[in-house]
Amino acid sequence: MTKVLLTGASGLLGGNILKHALANKTLDILPTRLGGDFSVPEAFRGDKEILPLDIRSQTWLWNIISQWKPEVIIHTAALSEPGACEWQRETAEAINTRAVKFIADLCEHFGIRLIFISTDLVFDGTKGDYLETDPPNPLNFYAETKCRAEEIVASSLHDYVILRTSLLLGASPQSLRSLDERLKADGEAGKTMTFFTDEYRNPIAASVLADITLKLASGNNRSVTGLFHAAGKDKVSRFELGEKLCQKYGISRQFYKGARQDEVTLSVPRPKDTSLISDALLTVMNFPMPSLDEMITALP
Ligand SMILES: NC(=O)c1ccc[n+]([C@@H]2O[C@H](COP(=O)([O-])OP(=O)(O)OC[C@H]3O[C@@H](n4cnc5c(N)ncnc54)[C@H](OP(=O)(O)O)[C@@H]3O)[C@@H](O)[C@H]2O)c1
């Protein structure tokens, strides 16, 4: 059994990782979260208790890690909303950057493998089809904090994987966390939605990324290390994605429209094309990435 400590177990990705891990008998998972005001549904956690852990506390991290002795840490916890990061910079820096330094230091001290989730937003979006060798240039504070965290992980550890991912789709423990959950709710409420026609991403289902992450935590892929892009293989505009989701949920064309970024007042700078090429990871893992249409069909 591989002992895996998971941060962010109540989040969109963390919840999906926990759900997958429960079905994997080779993993002993310890799920943790900050501890909000909602319960994680049983569909995601089975009968597992989710431990409270504020990753901003070095002592709290030390106590859990030194007592439980994980072989792998999957670190998904973050302040992940760019708007919240822009307005709460000190909190964003503490959670997204300083806490990663604490975790990386403990991984080095105890010889723990670290799998850290980062974002396509580290790029400025002027080029698109980014490779791992392309230089980051974050446009907003969220992306800056994640970029600094990537540098900390890569410079302090040997046994690490950084997964830069894109828009995550799928059911979340909190519901209304993913784009498809929000879009469906807005559609049911009869709200009119606007999707950017000039913003490109490679969406990926959180359950697919969960599968990739757990395969990197145990088994044959334990020798895979370094920085990798981990996103869907289909590049789409937000409008194309929104339209596919509206069609899936039976939302009529009158309830959504397209707009260019420059037609809307943006509260936080948004890169236009942060599409990622993920071939390096898929090749090294021999992972069969589903198409976007297959992932959308599988959404609840
Ligand atoms: N969602 C996307 O489309 C997307 C795209 C690219 C990259 N990413 C990256 O993927 C990762 C997962 O994102 P997500 O969307 O799944 O996140 P999410 O749904 O926003 O969940 C965030 C998680 O972090 C936990 N957390 C927040 N502050 C914490 C703290 N101080 N100590 C411990 N835990 C804390 C939360 O716990 P509570 O619930 O208890 O507060 C929650 O479990 C993040 O690193 C994010 O940057 C996400």
Image (cartoon, rainbow, N blue to C red):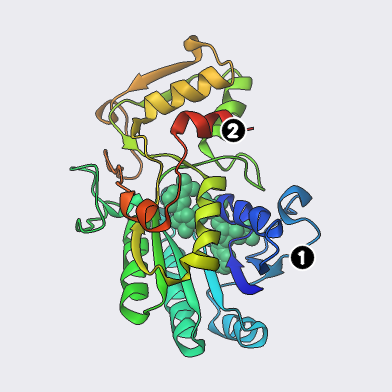
Q: Which mark is residue 226?
A: none
* Location of residue 148 with respect to 82 vertically, above or below: below
Residue 119: tell me if it is visible: no
Between 218 and 131, the one nearer to me in the picture: 218
Q: Is mark 2 within 8 Å of ligand 1?
A: no
Please tell me which residue lies in front, 191 or 137: 137
In the image as oriented, which residue stretches furthest toward the right?
47
Q: Is residue 262 above or below residue 14?
A: above
Q: CA distance from mark 2 to mark 1?
A: 28 Å
Confirm whether residue 284 shows in the render: yes
Quarter of the view holding residue 240: top left
Task: Name the residue at 36% across, 53% down.
Answer: 283
Amino acid type, residue under disc 2 in the picture: Ala
Q: Which residue is mark 2?
A: 298
Give x and y (percent) for residue 6.
Answer: 60, 67
Q: Residue at x 26, y 39 (%)?
A: 273
Q: Which SS class for mark 1? A: loop
Q: Tag 1: Cα neighbours inside 10 Å, few (<14), some, or many (≥20)?
A: few
**In screen coordinates, is 124 left or right of 218?**
left
Residue 215: x %, y % from top left: 53, 60
The N terminus lies in quadrant = bottom right
Q: Are marks 2 and 1 in contact (CB under 8 Å)?
A: no
Spot occupied by residue 47 in the image (x, y as percentages of width and height): 81, 59
Instruction: Answer left or right for 98 relative to 199.
Output: right
Q: Earlier in the sequence, mark 2 or mark 1?
A: 1
- Residue on which the image places disc 1: 49
The amino acid pointed to by label 1 is Glu
Q: Position of residue 14 (x, y in %)?
A: 59, 56
Describe residue 176's horizontal placement relative to residue 246 as left or right. right
In which quadrant is the C terminus drawn? top right
**Residue drawn at 58 percent across, 80 percent down:** 61
Q: Residues within 10 Å of mark 2 (few under 14, many from 20)?
A: few
